[in-house]
């Protein structure tokens, strides 16, 4: 089969590799009909995530048709149409029983590595380094899905792949980011980053009844798209984020703040943003947390910071004293995809949201390596790339 593989920083290739096979009775093999490049994939592309190995198959947003199942997989059969969550879940451990699927205690087959870095294991993830299990990803013609009885979302015929695909990641990620804010009708929600997750967070915050939603970015196409979803845009290249937020909130600051950027923050030309670049370049910190600092500073006292943006390692100069003394609540984590998908699928079917609005480029899988570069550079108006194997 053909698959997109990581061969080092800024080196993704479309290679021919062996087809996956059933390795465990709980497996299924899915023939991929549609997949996508996620902003989180750029952390791998830029060489920022540890434990990647040459030849790793990328991708964690994909869907398709079941073509084979293991003998212990009873609720799937060949021909079933499924979206596959990016989190691999057993459905039986204590965390899964609590609905905390992204910290499944059994699905990470490299749990010892995760425990050394994080203290406890995380769930296994598709196509996202050997720290999260080293599982082959979905930017391929076929994928082996472990724990397939639980690691799938069965979807109906009659809805296009493009409307359903993002149940795998960015739609529930944006939704969880907004839900974690516990939005009240009087709340202003400020969202840093108008990439795909930020776009879904905008729509989610509007659906959950925020008084006003504000989005901060520098890319005009992203800001226009977010405005179409009901957000007030701030272009940080053209105006002061702090001054504009004060103006929009009568000097009080937003009650709820969402970081949809994560470790590769570009959302400033300030001194501390340049400081992060220097520290990262000389390996004195792994991530650039400018957005996190800015949210702590501007959030209204007793407010909430929701962090769906991915962080991978060690941060520097976080103003934790300000966060403590302002009484801020932090809520964060990889997405508990299966917790939200039934409700979100219903909303798609009812027409409350059509996630396909975010797609700007659809290309064959073979063009994936070039599209990684286009997506990273935000060239050609690129916001979301869909690939067709």
Image: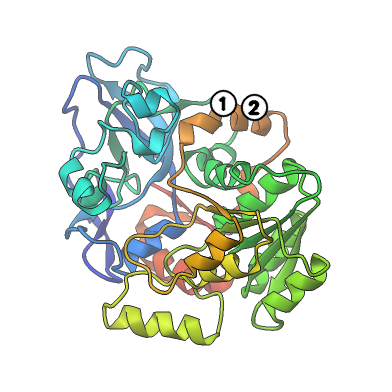
Q: Position of residue 261 (x, y in %)?
A: 51, 63
Residue tagged by mark 2?
346
Expressed as whole percent of the image width and height from the top left, the position of residue 11 reads 27, 69
Give SS at disc 1: helix
Left or right placement of residue 232 versus residue 4 in this view:
right
The front one of 313 and 324 is: 324
Tell me the tag on residue 342: 1
Judge by depth and name the residue closer to the eye, 364 or 290. Answer: 290
The x and y percentages for residue 341 are 54, 31
Q: Nearer the viewer, residue 111 or 322?
A: 322
3D distance between C-alphas at marks 1 and 2: 6 Å
> Which corner quadrant of the image does residue 77 belong to?
top left
Few, some or many residues within 10 Å of mark 2 (<14, 14–19, 20+) = few
Q: Is residue 362 above or below residue 106?
A: below
Q: Is residue 215 visible?
A: yes
From the viewer's perspective, tell me whether residue 326 is left or right of residue 335.
right
Residue 81 x %, y % = 45, 26
Residue at (46% x, 62% y) in the render? 262
Number of residue marks: 2
Quadrant housing the N terminus: top left
Q: State the residue at coordinates (35%, 49%).
A: 139
The residue that appears at 26% across and 46% down in the rendered structure is 132
Q: Taking 374 as reference, is 103 above or below it?
A: above
């Amino acid at each position: 089969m053909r698959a997109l593989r990581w061969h080092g920083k800024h080196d993704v290739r479309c290679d021919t590799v062996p087809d996956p096979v059933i390795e465990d009775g709980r497996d299924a093999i899915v023939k991929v009909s549609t997949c996508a490049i996620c902003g989180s994939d750029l952390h791998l592309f830029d060489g920022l995530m540890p434990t990647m190995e040459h030849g790793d198959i990328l991708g964690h947003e994909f869907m398709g048709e079941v073509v084979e199942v293991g003998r212990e997989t009873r609720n799937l059969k060949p021909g079933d149409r499924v979206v596959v969550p990016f989190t691999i879940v057993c459905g039986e451990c204590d965390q899964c029983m609590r609905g905390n699927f992204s910290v499944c205690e059994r699905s990470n087959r490299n749990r010892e590595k995760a425990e050394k870095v994080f203290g406890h294991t995380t769930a296994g993830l598709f196509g996202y380094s050997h720290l999260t299990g080293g599982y082959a990803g979905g930017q391929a013609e076929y994928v082996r899905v472990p724990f397939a009885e639980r690691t799938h979302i069965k979807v109906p015929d009659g809805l296009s792949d493009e409307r359903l695909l993002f149940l795998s990641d960015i739609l529930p990620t944006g939704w969880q980011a907004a839900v974690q804010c516990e939005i009240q009708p009087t709340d202003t929600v400020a969202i840093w980053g108008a990439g795909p997750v930020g776009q879904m967070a905008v729509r989610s915050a509007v659906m959950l009844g925020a008084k006003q939603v504000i989005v901060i970015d520098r890319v005009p196409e992203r800001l226009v798209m977010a405005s179409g979803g009901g957000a007030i845009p701030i272009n940080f290249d053209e105006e002061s984020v702090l001054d504009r937020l004060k103006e929009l909130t009568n000097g009080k600051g937003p009650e709820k703040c969402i970081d949809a950027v994560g470790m590769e923050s570009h959302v400033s030309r300030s001194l501390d943003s340049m400081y992060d670049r220097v520290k990262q370049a000389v390996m004195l910190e792994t991530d650039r947390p400018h957005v996190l600092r800015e949210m702590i500073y501007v959030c209204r006292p007793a407010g909430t910071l929701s962090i769906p943006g991915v962080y991978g390692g060690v941060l520097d100069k976080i103003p934790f004293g300000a966060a403590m003394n302002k009484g801020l609540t932090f809520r964060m984590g990889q997405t508990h995809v299966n917790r939200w998908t039934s409700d979100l699928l219903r909303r798609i079917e009812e027409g409350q949201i059509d996630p396909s609005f975010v797609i700007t480029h659809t290309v064959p899988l073979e063009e994936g390596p070039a599209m990684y570069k286009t997506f990273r550079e935000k060239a050609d108006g690129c916001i979301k790339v869909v690939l067709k194997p």
